[in-house]
Amino acid sequence: MTNPDIRPGRDVGILLEIMARLRGPGGCPWDRAQTFSTIAPYTIEEAYEVATVIQDGDLKALPGELGDLLFQVVFHARMAEEAGLFDFGDVVAEVTDKMIRRHPHVFGDAEAKSDAASQKDFWEKLKESERATKGHQSLLDDVAAALPALMRAEKLQRRASSIGFDWNNADLVVDKIAEEAREVAQARTHAEREEEIGDLLFVVANLARHLKVDPEAALRAANAKFTRRFKHIEQELAAQGKAPGSASLQEMEALWQEAKALEKVP
């Protein structure tokens, strides 16, 4: 039964109160049992669901998905408050301080950079000074380990490139990809293959960076394309009264090519 003294509304305070009730005495057993580590996977999942509705162009669903992500922030803040670490107000204070500090051309007397790229370069220099203040020993220390591997590879390489540890042009990276592919083919044990494929993927991420392509976004688009075309195969086989498992590879390949051709039709 819904508690009559809490009603849906636009005030974030209502959300904070809901979270407090869920975690408090008489609240939800599941919510009360959670910890930072058990909730973290849900936080990542909710962020991906936000990205998915944006990618799908389903902006009507975006408020709901952003709300789910905000709830994750409130959840973490509530657990921290219970442990005496910080509360939601501290989270807001941290991000408002950071945004004001990183935008002196908006909230101070500094002049704005001439374009978005120059502004991004300024932020990178500012973040470098912030890392030094936090006592990071390595340039790579604050590249989050929990990022998707492809995204983290690109960020690690971009960070190393900032001090000149990089290839001079994309052609050299293409040569390195060919070299790594040969090493994959030459690998004999499972451990060797795993290592060499990792090296190959790492260099592919570097090529994407050189070409100013987001490797994570590119792979998501490739996944979506594969899904579309494979569903076409399934649908066409179903129309013929066949299951995918009963069709020959040649039949499925022909339908795959048909799906590709249909995508090119204006």
Image: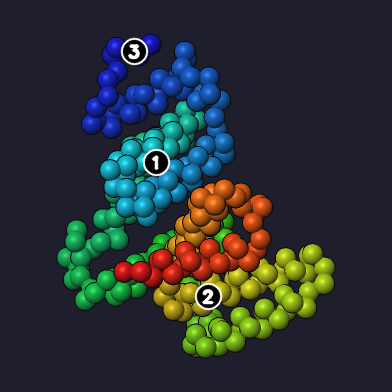
Dividing the image into 4 quarters, which one contains the C terminus? bottom left
> SS at mark 2?
helix
Q: Which residue is outermost to the right?
A: 189
Q: Is residue 137 visible?
A: no
Q: Which residue is mark 3?
A: 3
The disc, 1 or 2, on the residue closer to the chain's N-terminal end is 1
Q: Quadrant of residue 190?
A: bottom right
Few, some or many C-alpha atoms within 10 Å of disc 3 (few <14, some 14-19, many ≥20)? few
Q: Position of residue 108 (x, y in %)?
A: 19, 61
Q: Which residue is mark 2?
A: 206
Instruction: Specify the amino acid type for callout 3.
Output: Asn
Q: Quadrant of the N terminus?
A: top left
| Mark 1, other Cα within 10 Å: few <14 / some 14–19 / many ≥20 | many
Q: Which mark is residue 176?
A: none
2 up-or-down from 218: above or below: above
188 relative position to 154: left or right:
right
Q: Amino acid at mark 1?
A: Leu
Q: Is residue 113 left or right of residue 169?
A: left
Which badge, 1 or 3, comes first in the chain's sequence? 3
- Crowding around mark 2 (Cα neighbors within 10 Å: few <14, some 14 to 19, many 20+) is many
Q: Residue at x 74, y 77 (%)?
A: 185
Q: Residue at the location (46% across, 23% down)?
A: 23
Residue 69 is labelled as 1
The image quadrant that residue 183 belongs to is: bottom right
